[in-house]
Amino acid sequence: MFKEYLKLLKFMKPHKMQFFLACGCMLFSAIFDSVSLGMIVPLADKVLTNKKIILPNKVPAFIENFIASVNAIEPLALLKIMAIGILTLFVIKGFFNYWQSYLMSDVGQKVIRDIRARLYDKLQILSLDYFTKKRSGELISRITHDVKLVENATSYALTDLIYQTFQVIIFTSLVFIIHWRLALIAFIVGPLIMMPIVNVGKKLRKLSKTTQEKMADINSILQETIFGVKIVKSFAMEDYEAERFNRQNQDYYKVTMKSIKRTLVLAPVTEIIGAFVGIFVFWLAGKEVIAGKLSFGVFGLFLGSLLSMIRPFKKLSQVNSIIQQALAANTRIYEILEAPVSVEEKLEARELPRIKKNIIFEGVCFRYHDTEILKDVNLEVKQGEIIAIVGPSGVGKSTLVDLIPRFYDPQKGKILIDGINIKEVSLKSLRKQIGIVTQETILFNDTITANIDYGNKDANLIDIEEVAKQAYAHDFILGLKDGYNTTIGDRGVRLSGGEKQRIAIARALLKNPPILILDEATSQLDTESE
């Protein structure tokens, strides 16, 4: 677990200076917490009862000298000093509390910003075969839900882990300075508090992984049914889809409640064990106060310090729960970040000059998993030629053209452009020379202008209108309320199938590529447009 948590904390490396500054604020805040509690001693022993402060143990000389100087002050004078001191302490403590909370929250937000950016960047460079194995809803869940769990672990949980640990160390030091024998007795039963925390933490990690998988299932159903709403309605499957969603939603609820139940049980268990230890020590220390071996104020500080450790242990038990959930999410995040890229660009890849001669397939073979799609394909397409590839569905027509922009790489053979193996050139220089209109028309929830100039953001409106005319799209665009500034909705939902295809064709034409691939790009066009 420790190694995996360190792996999670690697995301904090760019913000380590801010993190260490926050740790410094936490340390001072924890110190002032203990100093505030220490005010019990002079208040009870000198101000209210005018008795001497008595410690049962031999303490360092500087503490002895300090106690002697406090014992020498008159009660009324000490009361005035304490009044000013307490107010000053709370102002300083409030200052450090604010900054440690702000800095750690800022670190947490920067971490999730960085993780989401890294995940999205990785998704951009992963090859198409990765997406054929993963559900889009699951990938979205990892960028949203899973990253949120990591945020909890790197901000709130880490804050508590460090701050509460500081408090435990400081209060532990106090009780050992005051009365080491009683402190030792108290800490013998300390492991009893840790046992339920460790056991529940292991179960929570398993449950958290299941919870994240259930959330991915919900996201997948949502995406499928929203994207396919027309099919759902046309087949009258609303009730079926509602039942399917509710089933997954109920499963998510059950797993989440199991996790919540185990998290909540930790707090009362740690409190009960802590109270048992406190009462036992209270009885032993009380006898020493009655015997005059310990002053009442020092006894109050000892008991207060001991009881003050219950809250940090309680918080640390909750921290363990959050960390276990985050580690499960972290595993799923690293599955994407460490996923191999099957189509990689060589380090010494060169720029591909603009095509002048031909594209040649030499002995190209390709398979999906164990299914052979293309076998020993030899093909030449000369510059200026138009080639139609025909055949029944599933024989590999789309796969054949997908090999040209290197969406996939063939297992055998090679593809040459002007005699240059496309594996030797940069992906960007290769794909800049290719315009594609896919079988499934893919548009973005933006204006028509933004969709057409998607591959050429330097284009002006005259160029955009020209390619729209070539794609038989200009007339229907002008008929829209906002013309070229019309927002077409998610996946172009406000346009007909034929209109969407014409926008996609205009987009490919604006790129003005030497290689144009039309993959059944006119299936929804009327005869004249086609």
Image (spheres, rainbow, N blue to C red):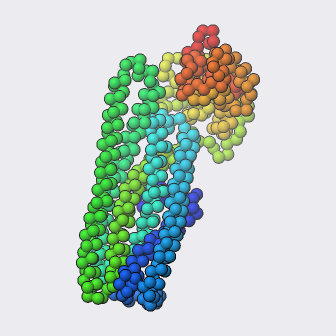
- Quadrant in the picture for the N terminus: bottom left
Residue 469: quarter of image: top right
How many labels, in total?
0
At 39% from the left and 44% from the top, the residue drawn is: 212
Q: Residue furthest front?
A: 76
**Residue 180 higher or lower than 103, as above or below:** below
Residue 442 in the image: state x and y as whole percent: 56, 27
Residue 474: quarter of image: top right
Residue 256: quarter of image: top left
In the shown orientation, is residue 385 left or right of residue 196?
right
**Residue 161 higher or lower than 432, as above or below:** below
Residue 211 in the image: state x and y as whole percent: 36, 44
At 59% from the left and 11% from the top, the residue drawn is: 526
Residue 321 in the image: state x and y as whole percent: 37, 56
**Residue 159 higher or lower than 450, as above or below:** below
- Quadrant in the picture for the C terminus: top right
In the shown orientation, is residue 48 left or right of residue 502?
left
Residue 108 is at least partly visible in this image: yes
Residue 516 is at least partly visible in this image: no
Front-most of 280 and 471? Answer: 280
Residue 482 in the image: state x and y as whole percent: 65, 22
